[in-house]
Amino acid sequence: MLIYSPPTTLSAVPVIDLKGGVQSRAEDRTAIAAQIRDACRNIGFFYVVNHGVPEALVQAQFDWTARFFDLPMAEKQSLHMRNSPTTAGYEPIAEQKLDSQDTTSEAAPPDLKESYYCGMDVPDDHPFARRRVRGIGHNQWPDSIPEFREQMVAYQAAMRGLGDHLLSLIALSLDLEADWFNKHHDWPSAVLRLVRYPPHPESAAFNQLGAGAHTDWGGITLLAQDDIGGLEVRNASNEWVAAPPIAGSFVINLGDLMARWTNGVYQSNMHRVLNAKSDQDRYSVPYFYSPRFDAVIEPVPTCVSDGQPQKYEVCTTAEHMDEMFRLSYGYEATS
């Protein structure tokens, strides 16, 4: 049984060496799981290095991300996420308001970013696609750059592999069997997002950021960020800690669903983004990896006891994600 204790204030996001990813030795995995336990308890964020994902694939992902956002606005608008029953597609600048979830701050204006979402690439007549589950099918692909789709699919496959490895380490960190979370990810709610943050304008409203202070909604997030910087994480003392780019790394953080699943033992932490460069776009590529839509989210057995009672109502992945989507975008999703 894991005993809850107050988080320790951290002044930096920890870096965890995965020692070759899935090829790491059993004794290494035990040590890595202990480091993940500390990071998830104290800040909910950590970097991973030596993760096994080819650097060439990551660089190609950034190249294609820039190519997508360089498309004419009319073509991007034709792919608007409202056109997809799973909300896959293009999101214009100022369409999302992430800071609305931060109850400790004043109401904030919309985010200064544009983005593109795609989920698992399956035929629209696939049984799960017919259920219109977010993260599966009904993607909208730009006709003018047909190779874009191939890159997105390849990158998603690599992120899913790394995500499964991280879930097994998180399970070990909670004194669970290594496959405890993986068995709920056979058909995951998996969303890849491309994000462009333009240079921060002088005309921006007070407290208007690239991405306002927020927590992620789902299970775990695997983030690739370019070398511009701007990501900040809030620690246990409510101080903002920079998470600068580290070559060859991914930033990993836990979402609200994982916090529910672990009964609050692990943290889903606030973070925000400000592109302070005056003449450069900032690009980031988060991969949101969550359990299948009908997974029942209730406390894992090692995180609840008589002295540590259940904090959250039981829900499904879809119920949780749909509510978070409504709060962030102001309209109902279709899953």
Image (spheres, helix red, strand yellow):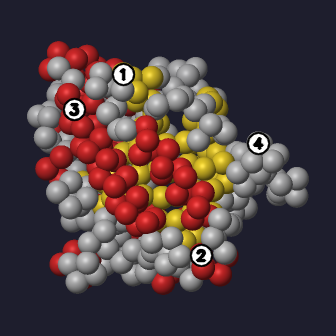
**Amino acid at circle 3:** Val
Is residue 287 shown above or below 326?
Answer: above
Q: Which residue is mark 1?
A: 17
Q: Which residue is mark 3?
A: 22
Give the number of the mark in front: 1 or 2. 2
Q: Is residue 124 above or below residue 11?
A: below
Considering the image in quadrants, where does the C terminus appear? bottom left
Q: Earlier in the sequence, mark 1 or mark 2?
A: 1
- Between the C-alphas of marks 3 and 1, the distance is 12 Å
User: Circle 2 is placed at which residue position?
Assistant: 76
Tell me, yes or no, whether the two marked residues, 3 and 1, touch with CB atoms within 8 Å: no
Rounded to the nearest whole Å, what is the CA distance between mark 3 and mark 2? 37 Å
> Which of the image's four quarters has the N terminus?
top left
Task: Indicate the amino acid at tag 2.
Answer: Lys
Graded by Cα atoms within 10 Å as few (under 14), some (14 to 19) or many (20 or more), the crowding at tag 2 reads many
Q: Characterize the local packing of mark 4: few (<14), some (14-19) or many (20 or more) Cα atoms within 10 angstroms.
A: some
